[in-house]
Image (tube, rainbow, N blue to C red):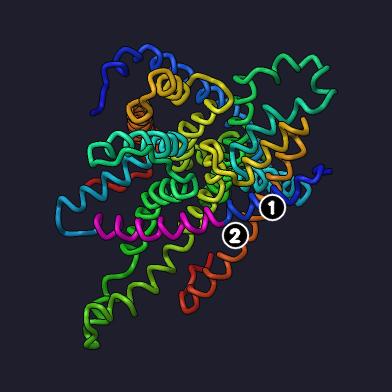
Amino acid sequence: MLHGYGSTILEGAWLTLSLALTSMTLAIALGLVGAAFRLSPLKWLALLGEGYATVIRGIPDLVLILLIFYGGQDLVNRVAPLLGHDQYIDINPFIAGVCTMGFIFGAYLSETFRGAFMAIAKGQAEAGAAYGMSRMQVFWRILVPQMIRFAIPGFTNNWLVLTKATALISVVGLQDMMFKAKNAADATREPFTFFLAVAALYLLLTTVSLLALRLLEKRYSVGARLAEL
Amino acid sequence: MLDFQLIADSLPLYGSGVLVTFKLLVIALVLGLTLAIPLALLRVSRAPWLNGPAWLYTYVIRGTPMLVQLFLIYYGLAQFEAVRESVLWPYFSSATFCACLAFAINTSAYSAEILSGSLKATPHGEIEAARAVGMSRFTLYRRILLPSALRRALPQYSNEVIMMLHTTSLASIVTLIDITGAARTVSSRYYMPFEAFITAGLFYLVLTFILVRLFKLAEGRWLAHLAPRKN
């Protein structure tokens, strides 16, 4: 049914998955930094974090991808000669994709993480301090585990949006499953078949993610009392 | 190093791009919300044969990328001879029509979930009061449930509208010259991608701020009764 294109599409699916996972790792790091900035008592740091989140969330992913991929490449090649580098620099689409996705979703995650930190009751840290824990101990033993609990629903949402947004990287030539499906569709003139197959793969990915993250949420909510409605 | 003179000369192109973006957004939102209301009513139904199909629809649409949905409609449907020979073919071969349809389907699923959540969160007392004054099921939905749920869905719906504004940028992939399409044209015409896309980003940023502001005003108008009391 897939005219032998099944295995190439699966290869593309593997690339999609690794792109999503690598970008998410970067996004978590940037999100934590962004959240720390926004919660900082230093006014200019807080403003910087605020600006990052607001600007990125106000611009479409596709425009940011085009800006970073084409614009970034253009800018690098305009700056490089000034630094004495004469060869044309080609940016690897996978690395560009990871940076772009990480940068975009870092902004969304900074919002999630900030909300999660603020949701922790003040008394928790105070109780930790009262037991004689150092600030680092309070942070790692008291705040972080609870922050993870509060952040999981928002994180789940961001992860699902990110996996789906990776499809856009195919527009700048990364050979993910979307790209491979487009090629196969053009070659066989059966676009519906191939895009439907890719839709099914994305649905599988989102379903598995949802189930896995729900288990994680249960694990981190052990000991939390839910409002009974 | 950056040259914005050519961008300034291309402003008319961006201007017409703004109009295309706006047109796509309005059509998608109107169609999407029209579809979302019956879908949300199905989603809150306790009958599995009503709830099930609506759940499956929103789950599949929300679980797959917008780009795949757009390609399925724009490129995919042409695979079938029945579509190519039907009276609807002039519509399905138009990028504008396909983009509007794909966006409307997409936003209908998200909006239906927002609205059904809002319907389910209706305070029980309101429903009991409506029943107590003898309203029929239909009157209950028309006078109590829907107006109240639509109002309470406003803050979340504003996020969906902004998401949709950003989603319309995908129309540039199927050849339409919206804001992103204008930027792509400028970028390839003068080979200055950085300036071209930064300008597009600024346009979207301004549109996003305007939408946020409008929704704040709308919330002040329709959600004033739920706002926290001042002082």
Query: Circle 2 sits on which residue?
Result: A210
> Which residue is rendered at x = 65% and y = 36% of the image?
B69
Q: Nearer the viewer, residue A60 or B107?
A: A60
Q: Nearer the viewer, residue B23 or B43?
A: B23
Q: Residue A57's spot in the image, x, y percent?
A: 38, 42
Q: Residue B64's spot in the image, x, y percent?
A: 63, 45
The CA distance from mark 2 to mark 1 is 21 Å
B21 vs A208: above or below = above
> Which residue is rendered at x = 21% and y = 52% of the image?
A46
Q: Is residue A81 left or right of residue B86?
A: left
Q: Which chain is indicated by disc 1? A: A
Q: Is residue A83 left or right of residue B119?
A: left
Q: Is residue A58 in view?
A: no
Dots 2 and 1 on the same chain: yes
Q: Which residues are magenta?
A: A18-38
Tell me the crowding category of disc 1: few under 14, some 14 to 19, or many 20 or more residues within 10 angstroms, Cα based: some
B160 vs B59: above or below = above
Q: Is residue A140 magenta?
A: no
| Marker disc for residue B41 | none
> Which residue is rendered at x = 60% and y = 30% of the image?
B104
